[in-house]
Image: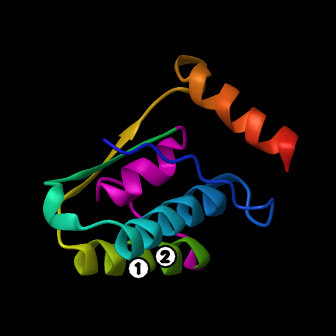
Amino acid sequence: MIGLIIHTDGGSRGNPGEYQAVIYALEWVKNNITIKQYNNISFFMDSKLVCEQLNGRWKIKQDHLRKLFTEVKRLEVEIGVPVSYTHVLRDKNKRADELLNQVLDTA
């Protein structure tokens, strides 16, 4: 298992930031990992909207999110292993918040 905390330098926040973090992570995986070593990639995220859209359960109504969605799906195809997205409530994900705050404090 590989864990990544993605910080988008404040350029994107909210749902666009969540999509951008997934894109950065998939690009990193594509460029740094021999995928044949893994049989899937799992994301745990606190944006229910992005999670449900990436899982194909909710419609994408905003054009800027649709463009980001398309980029994520393109990268998934290039990587070639199943990718899953799981929603995690922020208050149930305190350790990830602690780690992110450490990164932000040193940036």
Question: How far from the left and from the top, in percent, is residue 81?
Answer: 17, 64
Q: Residue at x 65, y 59 (%)?
A: 17
Disc 1 on helix, strand or loop?
helix
Residue 3 at least partly seen: yes
- Report which residue position mark 1 lands on: 70
| Magenta region, residue range | 46-63
Q: Residue at x 57, y 60 (%)?
A: 21
Q: CA distance from mark 2 to mark 1?
A: 6 Å
Question: What residue type is disc 1 on?
Answer: Thr
Q: Residues within 10 Å of mark 1 (few under 14, many from 20)?
A: few
Whether residue 77 appears in magenta in the rendering, the answer is: no
Q: Which is more toward the observer, 35 or 50?
A: 35
Q: Residue at x 48, y 53 (%)?
A: 50
* Callout 2 touching callout 1 (CB < 8 Å): yes
Placement of 78 over or under 57, stated as above or below: below
Question: How far from the left and from the top, in percent, is residue 39?
Answer: 13, 54
Disc 2 on helix, strand or loop?
helix
Residue 60 at least partly seen: no
